[in-house]
Image: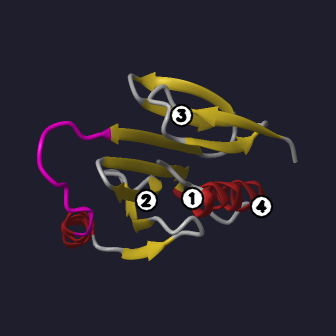
Amino acid sequence: MNYKKFKSNQGWLSFEYPSSMIQIEEDEGTYLFYTEDTGSFRITPLLLEGKGNFDTDQFLRNRQREYGGVIKLNGAQNEYLYYKSLDEDDDLIIYNWIFAKNDKIIYCSYTIDVDTEEQEKIIIEKREVLTIIENLNFV
């Protein structure tokens, strides 16, 4: 599979993604990666401004209390919260990852139709998204 390199406008987040995915900036700072007939992967990197120390551990634990899920460590040694949810109509499955490190937060989600979860093309694409999550690193 061929890959493209993504680098956020902020400059502190970059990763490779499958060249079969279309990449656009949805809102300022939110990036969408999708194909015409599968799911959509969104990523929003946020830089916190202000004075004081940001407690990333407490932030992730508060989100875990709010959403459930598990806190994990990826291959790049970044801690993140993973949880799965449904949209309000129960038509979409949303896989969610929240990273927090120093003064940065990254929200990631992968959304698919409920009835497509077991399709081979979705399984392959989800594997690619998980590879991005596993290797996600930011400075």
The residue that disc 3 covers is: 32
Q: Nearer the viewer, residue 139 or 17?
A: 139
Membership of 48 in magenta stretch? yes
Q: Which mark is residue 133?
A: 1
Between discs 3 and 2, the one toward the N terminus: 3
Q: Nearer the viewer, mark 2 or mark 4?
A: 2
Q: Earlier in the sequence, mark 4 or mark 1?
A: 4
Element type at marker 3?
strand
The stretch of residues the image draws in magenta is 47-57
Distance Cα–Cα, label 3 vs label 2: 15 Å
Tag 2: amino acid = Trp
User: Left of 108 or right of it: where is 135?
Assistant: right
Q: Are marks 3 and 1 in contact (CB under 8 Å)?
A: no
How packed is label 2: few (under 14 Cα within 10 Å), some, or many (20 or more)? Answer: many
Whole-number angstrom distance, CA of label 4 to CA of label 1:
20 Å
Please name the amino acid that badge 4 sits on.
Glu
Residue 41 quadrant = top right
What residue lies at 14% left-to-right and 38% top-to-bottom?
A: 50
Inspect the magenta stretch and tell me whether residue 12 lies in it. no
Q: CA distance from mark 1 to mark 2?
A: 8 Å
Query: In the displayed image of the protein, which residue is found farthest to the right?
Result: 1
Q: Amino acid at mark 1?
A: Ile
Q: Check disc 3: other Cα within 10 Å, few if <14, some if 14-19, many if 20+.
A: some
